[in-house]
Amino acid sequence: MKKRIAVLFLALVLAASSSTTALAAEASPFTDLHPEHWAYPYVSALHQSGVVGGYPDGTFQGENDVTWGEVFKLLLLAVGVEEPERDPEKHWAYPYIQLALDNRLVYAFLEEYLDAAPARLDVARMAARALDLTDISGESPYTDCADGYVVELFEKGIMNGTEEADGLRYFYPDRPISRQELSAVVWRMMNVDYHEGMFYFRNYWLDGLEGVPPIAYAPEQFVKNELGRLDYTGGYYTRGIDVSGHKGEIDWNAVAADNIDFAIIRAGNRLYGKDGSGAVLEDSWFDKNMQGAIAAGLDVGAYFFSNAITLEEAVEEADLLISKLEPYRQYITYPVVCDWEYLGGNKSRAYGVDAKIITDCIDAFCQRVAAAGYQPMFYFNDYCGYVKFDLSKLAQYPFWYAEYADAPDFRYHFQMWQYSSKGKVAGIGSDVDMNLCFVPWPGATRVPGIAPAPVPTPLGG
């Protein structure tokens, strides 16, 4: 929020000193920039505010390509970042590298490229990240680019592309961007009220998603019982757990006797560290847990802890999970889940991977599961649900949402809720994840003794 306050303050200063009418009446600050030029109002305003300068000969040379160093400086100043002190021993733009990394303009950068020219797509992505936007947006207006960041900037009126004689709009993502074009982008970043109608979440401005139903649960419908577990008073629900091999030996008969209706069991995982192999591993306890839960009379589903960052990886994970499920096919009454999680921060192999790619991976995983005859589902917390996934592209699948609270606080509806990681269940020697499921899955046998009440139709169910 502090960043945006700084931007609005700078915008007020510019608005008070640089209206288009007033600018047109003043002499141009650069010998090669006529007041009638389309870029004159933007360049002049930024020059007056000290954001852009010209060359020693008094020219602006607006058609010249900008460099990475120049883009870093201008975009960071546009969002209120203070200009750093320069190191006389280093490239003039060197101090901006760390600021660009800190503000997520880029996720890695080498000093040797400071004088190279970034492509327009690179600039668009940096501008969107500087404004704390995500790449989750609508359909692209461009014939040659569908990147989510680019679309988001178009929707906010910050980058418009070019409408050619054929009537189509082009972005030209691989071309460099000129000094005058970047000036227009920077001015709009400081003056356009781009967050109108958006909501703020953990340093991100987000649009509401079309086609994703709003949450239909009310906080007062969740009541903690004498065991410290949550009951749902709004209609049908079942109570379940999810486990991996980390739990060790489980007495599944004791679990079933402790008012637990279902279990979602991990079949495997992918290593997520940036410096690791990204290898896929099988859960060595999967068969024992699955057999024990089935023998105890529990309804069962399964999940794979995913960190897929390509479609090929997503399919590999889904195929491993499906192969592990085959001996238990007739007993799988609950969903088969893609549990894609973002862990490790900037040490994660998924660091900097766009939401569109991750969303496509989850979709590919779920499609594979559905083709194998199982009910697909995917799991997420609020960060992944808002920032790393585009839920509007996954609304055909049921949602399994994780938030450890006495009542969920999420904008969108979901079919299963993981409400605690500190559950106490007989037969399990350590804390366990606790879940409520609000959908009567076909074939499920365990019911909580509550007659099903009308609930929203499960997405994709």
Image (tube, helix red, strand yellow):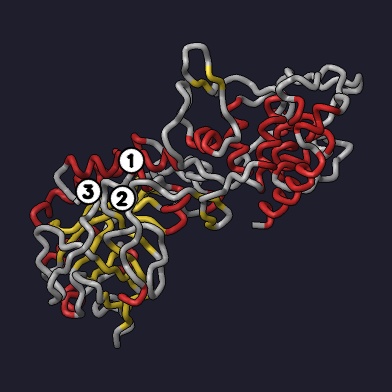
Mark 2 and 1 residues: CB-CB less than 8 Å, in contact?
A: yes
Q: Residues within 10 Å of mark 3 (few under 14, many from 20)?
A: few
Q: Gap in Å between the C-alphas at discs 3 and 1?
A: 20 Å
Residue in the image at 15% along x and 75% along y:
450
- The answer to whether any part of residue 395 appears in the image is yes
Give me the disc on residue 314.
Answer: 1
The image position of residue 414, as x and y in percent, is: 31, 59
In the visual, does 94 lie left or right of 397? right
Mark 3 and 2 residues: CB-CB less than 8 Å, in contact?
A: no
Give me the disc on residue 338.
Answer: 2
Q: Earlier in the sequence, mark 3 or mark 2?
A: 2
Residue in the image at 44% along x and 49% along y:
272
Residue in the image at 32% along x and 54% along y:
213
Disc 1 element: helix
Foreground residue, 412 or 155? 155
Q: What kind of residue is marked 2?
A: Cys
* Above/below status of 282 relative to 125: below
Q: Which residue is mark 3?
A: 460
Disc 2 element: strand
In which quadrant of the rendered image does the N terminus lie? bottom right
The image position of residue 38, as x and y in percent, is: 71, 22
Residue 248, picture quadrant: bottom left
